[in-house]
């Protein structure tokens, strides 16, 4: 499993990254976490409101900071 | 709507505590305004956020890319009211629109309308000035967004964009399902977030407003911000540009100034300049747009806001 966090570096994106790390730690699974800050890469997903969350190349959330428990739902 | 609350506060300050004079007037004003504004802020921001959750920007983009340009300007401006906008999203948003082959002018119509009609500004306006002024503000805001977008679109400035996003080909479908309950929770969390950010500015704004209300003589305001001086609208617009982050704090001040005789057109120009033209946004957009285009964008919108201020002062 691979989780990507799309964001140009605002506070919300940093918060989402923290929450993802927390959720992954809780799940105990092996998950690759990648931060995507390059605007061209973000555009490829067609996401326009950051932060965006992408799991295995699928956009699962845009424009909001999911809580660790919300992210955990996706990892399960 | 809040007459009962004014009565309670008046009774408390003047009857119960037997206060009088300038300090009492200022305190009365502060207590009344603080409670009223915070109640309305919570209700309006929550409602706006909730309604917005049904209009994700990705859907708006897909919809706009299929529209006739002129119609597109009008729609883009209207969508600016109902979609969330934060400055840090300005770049992906801009590029996303261009990717979808939405004309530059239409993109600007949206980019002007979205911050102008943000939930904080609308909530504060409604709380302080009531429905009529809020409607006028939104109406004229749309007009500025549509006309400025049309002008920018006519100037053929496509070469002033520094990053060329590739056109969209079969982008992954972004179908995110959110349930009703989750929307309510999300909206509430968001409302709490916003309040956490702005409460201190609002209280500071009301405090300063209360001070002016109690201590600054009316003639002083009329002399400098009334209808007499031809340059007051221009000064108000220029003053409004650096104040974006504190819109919530500045609005209570504007209320007091209007109360004391500042003309409504000047006040409207001031508010629009605060919300529509933000320096932080310009700094961010500089990464993808040339300085020339940003100056044209600010200039066009600024002139539009000034004209509206004059029209308004002239009518009223």
Image (tube, grey):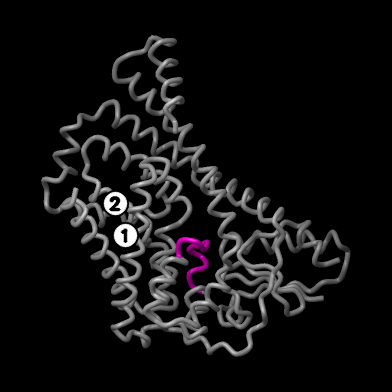
| Label 1 secondary element | helix
The dot on residue A30 is none
Please state which of residues B74 and B39 is positioned toward the viewer in this rendering.
B74
Residue to which mark 1 is pinned: B140
Q: Is residue B207 above or below residue B197?
A: above
The image shows residue B117 at horizontal and vertical percentages of: 42, 58
Residue B241 placement, left or right of B53: left
Q: Position of residue A23 (x, y in %)?
A: 79, 60
Asked if disc 2 and disc 1 are in contact, CB closer than 8 Å, the reply is: yes
Instruction: Answer above or below: position of B189 versus B298.
Output: above
Query: Of helix, strand and loop, which one carries label 2?
Result: helix
Comparing marks 2 and 1, which lies closer to the viewer?
Answer: 1
Residue B180 is a magenta residue: no
Along the line of sight, the residue nearer the viewer: A32 or B213: B213
What residue sits 30% from the left and 68% below the top? B298
Q: Mark 1 or mark 2, which is nearer the start of the sequence?
A: 1
Considering depth in this image, is B109 or B235 the residue closer to the camera?
A: B109
The lab-note entry on whether marks 2 and 1 share a chain reads yes
Q: Determine the image quadrant of residue B209.
A: top left
Disc ID at residue B268: 2
Residue B147 in percent (x, y) is at 30, 71
- Magenta extent: B80-91
Estimate the x, y position of residue B178 in percent, counting from the top left: 70, 62
């Amino acid at each position: 499993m691979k989780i990507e966090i799309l964001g140009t570096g605002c506070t919300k994106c940093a918060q989402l990254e923290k929450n993802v790390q927390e959720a992954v730690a809780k799940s105990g699974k092996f998950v690759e976490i990648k931060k995507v800050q390059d605007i061209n890469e973000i555009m490829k997903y067609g996401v326009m409101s950051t932060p965006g969350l992408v799991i295995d190349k699928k956009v699962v959330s845009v424009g909001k900071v999911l809580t660790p428990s919300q992210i955990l739902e996706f990892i399960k | 709507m809040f007459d009962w609350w004014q009565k309670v506060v008046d009774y408390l300050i003047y009857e119960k505590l037997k206060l009088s004079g300038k300090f009492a007037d200022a305190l009365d004003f502060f207590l009344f305004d603080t409670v009223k504004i915070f109640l309305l802020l919570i209700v309006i921001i929550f409602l706006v956020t909730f309604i917005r959750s049904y209009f994700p920007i990705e859907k708006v983009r897909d919809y706009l890319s299929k529209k006739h340009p002129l119609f597109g300007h009008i729609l883009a401006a209207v969508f600016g009211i109902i979609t969330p906008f934060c400055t840090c999203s300005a770049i992906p948003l801009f590029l996303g629109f261009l990717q979808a082959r939405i004309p530059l002018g239409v993109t600007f119509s949206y980019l002007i309308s979205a911050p102008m009609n943000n939930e904080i500004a609308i909530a504060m306006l409604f709380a302080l000035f009531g429905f009529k002024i809020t409607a006028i503000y939104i109406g004229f805001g749309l007009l500025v967004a549509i006309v400025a977008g049309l002008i920018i679109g006519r100037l053929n400035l496509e070469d002033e964009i520094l990053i060329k996003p590739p056109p969209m080909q079969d982008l992954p479908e972004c179908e995110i399902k959110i349930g009703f309950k989750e929307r309510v929770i999300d909206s509430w969390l968001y409302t709490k977030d916003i309040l956490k950010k702005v409460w201190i500015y609002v209280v500071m704004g009301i405090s300063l407003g209360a001070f002016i209300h109690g201590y600054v003589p009316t003639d002083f305001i009329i002399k400098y911000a009334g209808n007499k001086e031809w340059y007051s609208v221009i000064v108000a617009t220029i003053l409004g540009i650096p104040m974006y982050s504190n819109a919530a704090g500045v609005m209570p001040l504007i209320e007091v100034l209007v109360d004391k005789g500042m003309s409504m057109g000047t006040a409207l120009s001031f508010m629009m300049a605060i919300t529509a033209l933000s320096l932080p946004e310009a700094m961010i957009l500089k990464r993808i747009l040339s300085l020339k285009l940003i100056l044209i964008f600010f200039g066009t919108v600024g002139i539009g806001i000034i004209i509206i201020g004059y029209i308004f002062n002239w009518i009223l």
